[in-house]
Amino acid sequence: MPAEVEKDIHACLQCGYCNFVCPIQLNPDRGFESWRVRGKMYHLKRYAHPGTFDRLMRRRPEITPEFVERVYNCTACGYCQHVCHANIKFNDRWEQVKEWFVTNGAGPLDRHKALRTRVIAKHNPYDEPHESRDAWIPKTAKRSRNPEILYFTGCTASYRQQKIAQDATRVLDAAGVDYDILGKDEWCCGSPLIRTGQTDIVRDEVDGLVKHNLNEIEKRGARTVVTACAGCFMTLSHNYPLYAGKPDFKLLHLTQFIDKLVADKKLKLKKPLPKKVAYHDPCHIGRHFGIFEEPRRILKSFPKSSYIEMKHNRYDSQCCGAGGGYKIQFNDRAEYIASLRVLEAKELGAEMLVSACPFCVTNLTGGAKVAGVKMEVAELVSLVAESVS
Ligand code: SF4
Ligand code: SF4
């Protein structure tokens, strides 16, 4: 067992403050203690240190496939870390536990294994040809050969939400930003592999994903990297430094960058929001990094802003259900969790649910279908692109 996990299983007070925040428990059949953070911590503790009765009975709790499945029932939302009274750093601990499972052949789950194969073969988890990674780039994009800013697109925007990537370039062009895009030189950032414990090809020092992407970023010479994807943001800002040390560039989420462009009057939002809009905080920029106010300031900068606040917001935001490899393995459950978020927005009277992550947008769109309600789901950068053009 990893040393930091071993230390924290003793730190857990079994107080249960984490019991009612985990999005997995929103599934009606996932409420039992064994699915909860407290229950999983207890299992790990008893595995490492069998109790007196276990010793008398000459038995020991095992790392069974059922337990492994429970650990992989996690969206990496960070809520358990946020509420933990013992200050356990769950954002890293769950990944360390999964890495330990993978090392010992106990994990990952079947669909997660396919991710690794695809990323090795095609540098993306969607099984799309690498040659078409830059097919989304508009011919009109004003790219620079010596850029100040590099837009890291990510796999979801490159292959599944191409309009979001195109809208990002529309916004950068409208503000006169000196930028470039990696295009085919960009590989998957590694987020889905890290979240599922498959870090070997991410951290490989010869041709791993971290090494490759950092080399390509360095070649472009940009001092600042921006990304619209919350998953890429978390990976580049938290995981890359763990594997490769502090990078030479500054990393910003696109909402932080746009917020500054608006404040500096380099970008003027001219058209009002199209509908009554509520904002969904992506966990990987919100609870993990405290990027709460920048997207809200942008929304409030629209003329006659019709922005409304969700009941669960900022640190108390409810996860959409997509992250941590959960959607990949348990798509129906992920979309069910998203449907609850959509219904929350609907009850507020919102006509549009906006987020700041292409993967959240994908899952919330599925959630709206599951909920069976009329709710448009959009990316904030698309609203900005529409307003400035
Ligand atoms: S990170 Fe979120 S989904 Fe994972 S165990 Fe903690 S609360 Fe549950
Ligand atoms: S809140 Fe922290 S200390 Fe309390 S039961 Fe949950 S993991 Fe353990």
Image (cartoon, grey):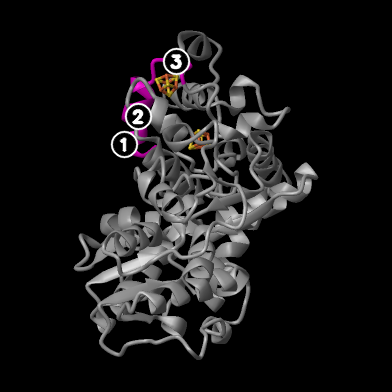
Between discs 2 and 3, the one toward the N terminus: 3
Q: Is mark 2 within 8 Å of ligand 2?
A: yes
Badge 2 marks a residue whose secondary structure is loop
**What element does badge 1 sit on?**
helix
**In the depicted structure, whether residue 316 falls above or below residue 145:** above
Which x, y percent locates residue 195?
Answer: 48, 51
- The residue that label 2 is drawn on is 88
The mark nearer the N terminus, 2 or 1, is 1
- Per the image, is 4 magenta? yes
Residue, x 54% and y 31% (percent of image)? 311
**Amino acid type of the residue tagged 1 in the rendering:** Ala
Is the C-beta of the residue carrying label 1 under 8 Å from the nearest atom of ligand 2? Answer: no
- The boundaries of the magenta stretch are 1-17
Q: In the rendered image, which residue does mark 1 sit on?
A: 3
Residue pictured at 53% horizontal, 52% vertical:
355
| Image quadrant, ligand 2 | top left
State whether residue 292 is above or below residue 129.
above
